[in-house]
Image (tube, rainbow, N blue to C red):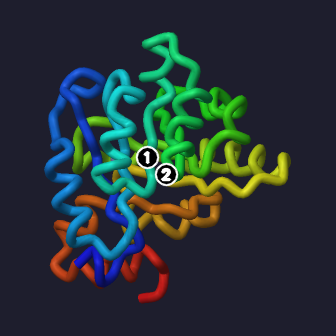
Amino acid sequence: MVNRSADLFHLDIMDGTFVPNLSFGFPVVEAIAKIATKPLDVHLMIVHPEKYIERFAKAGADYISFHLEAARDDGNDPVEILRMIRSLGVKAGLAIDPDVPVEDLFPYLEEVDFLLIMSVFAGFGGQKFIEDTYGRVKTLKAEIDRRGLKCPIEVDGGVGPGNADKLAEAGVEMFVAGSSVFNAPDQEAAVRAIRGCN
Ligand code: ZN
């Protein structure tokens, strides 16, 4: 279904430490890479992301994002991690949870290929979209435009046909949808509705 109708496979990697939940690791990413005809977007919700980036790249990731909070907690420079991702030929993204000001991303705008704004707190599927996200995206998009940059904004959490229009208006270009697609009676119609071509 994802191969047919979506643009990316967004894979949430959870370690039970950065977030209080576990998802899956390398073997599952490798298995998906074997059958995927669309790029793999690996979202690392883990501590010490720099330790695992090379393995996720080898497993087939085309995009890798990690959390600014994870790098800060370790005292690591996010720029070094972003450059490590890019050096592997993978698109590099920086993610933040809803309680981190978007201004905290500003020092890194020149170093990223995309930015991931969480519209729920990282860690669980099926959460309700946080309305504050529209304003956060607008602020971030204004700064990206002001600097003449092109990095797209991705939004993850509670995204569906009901809010995709307003998110697109605010400046979102990459929409991560989980429950709103997988729980829909017609999953491909849900993807089309998010694209606005229904
Ligand atoms: Zn995600």
Disc nearer the start of the sequence (2/1): 1
**Disc 2 vs disc 1: Cβ atoms closer than 8 Å?**
yes
- 146 and 88: which one is in front? 88
Residue that numbered label 2 is attached to: 90
Picture coordinates of residue 33, whole percent (x, y):
26, 63
Q: Quadrant of residue 193?
A: bottom left
- 177 and 131: which one is in front? 177
Res. 142 mark: none
How far apart, in angstroms, are the residues tagged by discs 2 and 1?
7 Å
Mark 2 surroundings: few (<14), some (14-19) or many (≥20) residues within 10 A = many
Picture coordinates of residue 149, whole percent (x, y):
77, 52
Query: Taking 185 as reference, is 12 above or below it?
Result: above
Mark 1 surroundings: few (<14), some (14-19) or many (≥20) residues within 10 A = many
Query: For the N terminus, which image quadrant?
Result: bottom left
Kindly tell me whether residue 43 is visible in this rendering.
yes
Query: For the C terminus, which image quadrant?
Result: bottom left
Picture coordinates of residue 196, whole percent (x, y):
48, 81
Q: Quadrant of residue 169?
A: bottom right
Residue found at x 23% / y 40%: 124
Label 1 near ligand 1 (CB < 8 Å): no
- 143 and 149: which one is in front? 149
Residue that numbered label 1 is attached to: 64
